[in-house]
Image: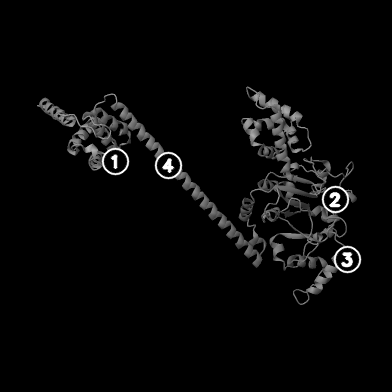
Amino acid sequence: MNELRQGVFEYLMDSAPEALKAAARGEVAHVLASLGERGKLLLDGDADLSELANLVSAELNSRTSKSVLEESELHRLLEDWRTAAVKSRPYYLSLPVWPDFAAPNNPVDGLLPTCRVHSWEHFVEVMRDPNQNRARHEIIYRGQRGYNWPLASTLTRQFSDGSIRDEDRDALLMYFRLAMRGRGPDLTLMEDEDVWAYGQHVGLATPLLDWSKSPFVSLYFAFAEPDPENAANHSRAVFCLDMTRLKVALSELFVEPRSNDNARLVSQAGLFTLTPSGSENFESYIINALQENSAIDFDGFEDLPTPENGFEFPANDIARKLAPYICKIHIPNERRLECLAMLRKMNIHHGSLFPDPFGAAQYCNDWLVRKIKEDDDERKAAESARIAAEAEAKAALSAERAEAASKEAELKSHSTVGTSLDDRVKQLIALNAASFNQEIDTSSWAKSIIQNYSNLESVDWVRKETTRASVKRGFARQLGLLGAGSLSNRLADQLVDIFADEYRHRNNLDFEGKKEPSIGYDFFAAARANMAKEASKEGREET
């Protein structure tokens, strides 16, 4: 099974309805690939999609354990897919990829051998083709922004039918010679071709078309200007013309000014072609001349226009024969600024191509536009980085709070099952030991903390914020000296909760400390007495 042309597959995937992608559970790309060339039915507004629906349904069902879509729903989604694909289908995707050529025979390309490349980088690769670099066949190039712009000179565009009348052309040239008297160089002694070339330079409507011997200069002119807002221009174009072959039989078409006062022409490796007068346009003039001189065999060719809704132009033999003489390459209109940046590295820009004040001004304007864009991009990147950092900090803080809450809950759960004060303090220290930058003895820490509490406590200290704060400060100072570092304050808060909880429990106080304490018993006094007794016992054992 033949595959879809490169670029067509990607375009159809981009056009696929989100509802279909969701319903197919990520299998749309596999399904489209399995259809091969039959997938191009999605680009045909008149095609019957019934067979396609059956194929899609079978493929989806083979990849899942149960039916993915009802038949009616699948038909509706395929219709939506086709509608979206046909509505915004780029013209250039209908063309074969270099080195194959089609002769579309339509209003866009006429009978010109036409193809496409995948990107402007691909165009650069194509220009390395040996046939583009033969010393015996000098090829010239012309770049145009609009994919559907014809090879029409400024004078041709003045006439609604595109035909230059001989009398009008001759009269214009005579009036220009007369109008230039006393205003610049003497044009009366110049050849007509040189007068047209000078007029082209200063803005006269002429029958000349600008060409360059450099394909990269032509690529620059194809991509130099942005498209007007909301303009549908999916590709840009570069025309190729084998001047060496054509000059033998059609020398009248080529104009290479001999004067040395046109610096732009020199910088652009430029020259002109002269659009013939009469009813023929430039490309048809060349094609007809090739046929009349039997340079190409047109046997079997039928000059039938392609239907307007034609969605694919296959490569054909006539286009293959014509392409070495004249052809047109469509380049996807994507990443224009990257293309211009690459060409700048080759010293192809307004400043080099227009060595005059106009070129210098345009070059500076271009620099300013690029700088403003880079500044905006940097600001956006910095803002995105700031937002990401804030989100990360919030997430870290939330995780830290959740961990602290978990540890606190664990401590409280231990207290509800009769865990001793000494054990609770040890547990708190053990849970945070991994965060200390030292090896610690939890028993020793717990003992010193309980001893320190005896110096910090006061009667009913849990009832007052001031006394609670004083106890916390005492714990924090002690923990800092022990080596708890940045955790000192948080651990001090938790120690206050532990000792306050124990104080309330032992003295029969409710949560707010409002009940009367039990008479005759002081837990912490008893704890101190026990600690003194243990210290005395340890002293006797040592002796």
Check the image and name the residue furthest to the bottom: 182
> Sequence-wise, which precedes: disc 1 or disc 2?
2
Label 2 – label 4 distance at C-alpha: 70 Å
Q: CA distance from mark 3 to mark 2?
A: 25 Å
- Of 308 and 19, nearer the camera is 19
User: Callout 4: 10 Å neighbours few (<14), some, many (20+)?
Assistant: few
> Which residue type carries mark 3?
Glu
Residue 528, percent from left and from top: 16, 31
Looking at the picture, how far across and down is residue 234, in whole percent? 70, 48
Give how far across and how far down residue 344 sits, in percent. 62, 56
**Dot 2: what SS?**
helix
Quadrant of residue 490 in the image? top left
According to the picture, the residue beneath numbered tag 1 turns out to be 489
The residue positioned 69% from the left and 43% from the top of the image is: 118
In the picture, measured across the screen, residue 344 lies left or right of residue 189, that is left
Q: Residue furthest top?
A: 65
Marks 4/1 in contact by CB < 8 Å: the verdict is no
Report whether residue 406 is seen: yes
Which residue is located at x 44 percent, y 41 percent? Answer: 392
From the image, tell me which residue sits under label 4.
Answer: 394
Q: Secondary structure at mark 3?
A: helix
Query: What amino acid is labelled 4 in the image?
Result: Lys
Identify which amino acid the numbered label 2 is placed on: Ile
Can you tell which mark lies on residue 287?
Answer: 2
**First of labels 4, 3 by sequence position:** 3
Q: Which mark is residue 167?
A: 3
Mark 1 in CB contact with mark 3 (< 8 angstroms): no
Q: Nearer the viewer, mark 1 or mark 3?
A: 1
What separation in Å lies between label 1 and label 2 (alpha carbons)?
89 Å
Please report contact status of discs 2 and 4: CB closer than 8 Å, yes or no: no
Label 1 secondary element: helix
